[in-house]
Amino acid sequence: MAEPRPRVWASQPLFGDVVDRLRAHFELEVTPEATDHPPARIAEALADADGALVTLNERIGAAEIARAPRLRAVANVAVGYDNLDVPALSAAGVLVTNTPDVLTETTADLGFALLMAAARRIGESERWLREGRWQGWSFDRLLGVDVHGSTLGILGMGRIGQAIARRGRGFGMRVAYHNRSRLPEAVERELGAVRLSFEALLAEADHLVLVLPYSAATHHIVDAAALARMKPTATLVNIARGGIVDEHALAEALAAGRLAAAGLDVFEGEPAVRPELLALRNVVLTPHIGSASLATRRAMAALAVDNLIAALGAGPQAGRPPNPVNAEAVAAAGRKR
Ligand code: GLV
């Protein structure tokens, strides 16, 4: 008898024509409409799945895979994967993949847009105009801070951080960064970027952009003490994950004028946004749209589908998915069993 085809669960519809490519190799169950799945539904869907295509809305850990003996691969349609408990998945022999590179430029665009909007008070200006308050031009209305000629600070100098650095160069900014490891000298030269300590970066940046992965080590790395080191004229942009910033401390600093403005695309409790932030005029808020261009979202879905096909041993890259996250840990767990 022929082996049954592997089963795959797609947690969200994404792009039908892209997700349907999985049907060439697998039995596919696609959630027909964008859905907020409770944990029990995720566990149920994974129970008889060999693979899953998921977004950062789905949190998957030991509890969700406890009854999923066949699960071998989870393809996350995102570059960040803090929605997945990677050690728990690795221990169960489940390969995780993500979607780097294809979203780098689009996400950097949004980071720069938030920087410009925060610095030049664009959200605040627009709200003010729409409220019908513009009765005449005024010399000192809505004065912001300059972007050109200022110091751009980048915390986390991976692919997206470097793409932001290139944008900063184009705007005539001095580029400084902090990263665990120093970039190769040739890359620093090309980007015109200097590496500073975390403390020096906080103190010197006129505009600080957060682009580092979220983990226990980076939880609230920008806390009250870090914010206190920043210039009162500085702006802060977060396009990484909400948990990197202590939002309560940020709201206090913004309200007290200890920081000029912020642009936030991510929030610790998203989709809930703290009322203190919503009440502030000097913060620009967007609903986690960093990679949200049509072309990039299609590219992310396509890459995740390629990863899943290969991770489950099918297609031209069988066994060699382009973006494995935990291949070594899965191999080590396999040896233990
Ligand atoms: C979006 O936040 C991503 O990690 O891709």
Image (cartoon, rainbow, N blue to C red):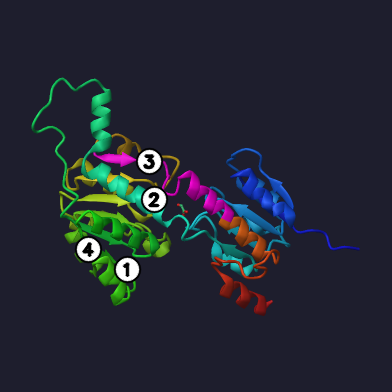
Pointer 3 or 4: first along the chain: 4
Front one among 111 and 89: 111
Counting residues from the start of the chain, the first of labels 1 and 4 encountered is: 1
Question: Are circles 1 and 4 on residues that touch, CB within 8 Å?
Answer: no
Determine the residue positioned at 54% across, 65% down.
Answer: 323
x then y, percent, for residue 256: 18, 42
Closest to the observer, 120 or 286: 120
The residue at 20%/57% (across/down) is: 173
Q: Is mark 2 within 8 Å of ligand 1?
A: no
The reply, left or right, for residue 197 in relation to residue 17 is left
Which residue is disc 3 drawn over? 286
Tell me the quarter of the picture where residue 144 sits: top left
Q: Secondary structure at mark 3?
A: loop
- Label 4, on which residue? 201
Q: Quadrant of the C terminus?
A: bottom right
First of labels 3, 1 by sequence position: 1
Image location of residue 201, percent across then percent down = 22, 63
Distance in Å between CA atoms under marks 2 and 4: 20 Å
Q: Is residue 39 above or below residue 153?
A: above
Q: CA distance from mark 1 to mark 2?
A: 19 Å
Identify the residue under disc 1. 179
Q: CA distance from mark 3 to mark 2?
A: 12 Å
Q: Is residue 60 visible?
A: no
Instruction: Tell me if I can see residue 230 in this picture.
Output: yes
**Residue under label 2:** 242
For the point 39% across and 50% down, the residue is: 242
- First-in-chain label (3 vs 2): 2
Q: What is the magenta range? A: 282-302
- CA neighbours of label 4 inside 10 A, class few (<14), some (14 to 19), many (20+): many
The crowding category of the residue bearing disc 3, from other C-alpha atoms within 10 Å (few below 14, some 14 to 19, many at least 20), is some
